[in-house]
Amino acid sequence: MSYVLKSKCRYKVDRTGSVYEFPCILTQSGVLTSHVQYLFKNRGKSQSWIEKSNSSVTLLIKYIDAHTQSLSEKQKVKGVELLRNFTAALNIGTIDLNGRDPSGLFWKVRNTRDAQVILYHITRYTDYFSERNECQIPVNPFIKASHTEEKINWCAYYHHQAGVFLNHLEDRKAITEKMQWVRAIQSDRPEVIANEKVVRFREDKIEVLLKYGFLKQGDKYPDYKNQLITMLMHYGGLRLSETFHIYVNDIICDYKRNEAVVRVYHPASGESPESPKQLRKTYLQEKYALKPRNEYSKNLRLHAGWKVPLLTNKKRYFEVILVKVTQKQLKILGECMILRFVELD
């Protein structure tokens, strides 16, 4: 009986001490080494991207196993047709109206955007596999776009380019050529939602939250760590994951201007707090035997994401200026620095 399991593996490129940890796919034939090598090639991607790639390929293997076991060799579906059927199974599910599924997968209908992401990851991996093995025909090749598909390509292109600086410098001829091609297999298009409301914490309640929301009954001091995280997110606009990359040394209180300046460094290539010639990744490894938080697997508590924000300094950080911060709140920041309650673990 075939099986597909998710596991962990340590990938060693050469005879040095450098070892990379990746989630790997374990089958009855062993580890899917081509996917591990694919993840190594894309090691600069986020842990979320790596995990999604792993789970997407796992779904494809489960689908292949479920169907090749029940078909004769002449009936086996291969290549483009198999991927097309797999994509249909993602969009419409595998369970009939009576609750039966001869394949044993029992997949429910997936969100169209989720199905699109899964197909994207599988297409990227199969492209890599085809190039590495010098296959002439990839599993999901490009085909000539219809007039409607070309229009949709242009709409997606202009939507993406709207916020890109210096987008007028792109090669229009190359872009026009690119818009004329689409993938042979595509997922159902997700619904367009333009009027979704954004929920914002009430401004008149933030003082109450900071004053009473982090003080447990019987405790002498409030939870300084979570107070500071809340202030950074509310007044500075930080993502939650970005707050977990901040060191105590990254917080500067400017009492004259009534501002708190927080520097968010790149978790790996940012300047070390001890030496301008040392990277944070090296600092963490040598002093604490740790990795940057964004390099840990998502299922570990040490993990914190990194969305590649725009850095504004050659030391590889961007500054967050907390506006509308009171003297009392600045005092809290100072206490956080003195008491070292800001070690975000």
Image (spheres, helix red, strand yellow):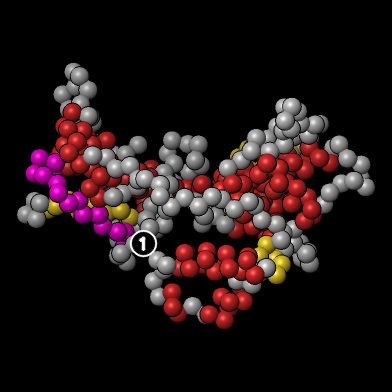
Which one is nearer the viewer's eye here, 269 or 182?
Answer: 182
Amino acid carrying mark 1 in the image: Leu
**Is residue 131 found inside the magenta-colored segment of the image?**
no
Q: Is residue 101 visible?
A: yes
| Magenta residues (range) | 315-330
Q: Is residue 262 above or below residue 338?
A: below
Residue drawn at (78%, 37%) of the image: 66
Which one is nearer the viewer's eye here, 35 or 177?
Answer: 177
Point out residue 163 in the picture as x, y percentages from the top left corner: 40, 66
Horizontally, residue 152 falls left or right of residue 66, namely left
**Is residue 323 found inside the magenta-colored segment of the image?**
yes
Horizontally, residue 162 falls left or right of residue 129, namely left
Q: Is residue 30 visible?
A: no
Mark 1 — residue? 310
Residue 169 quadrant: bottom left
How many marks on residues? 1
Residue 165 quadrant: bottom left
Residue drawn at (23%, 29%) of the image: 214
Horizontally, residue 253 falls left or right of residue 76, namely left
Task: Report the quarter where the N terminus lies.
Answer: top right
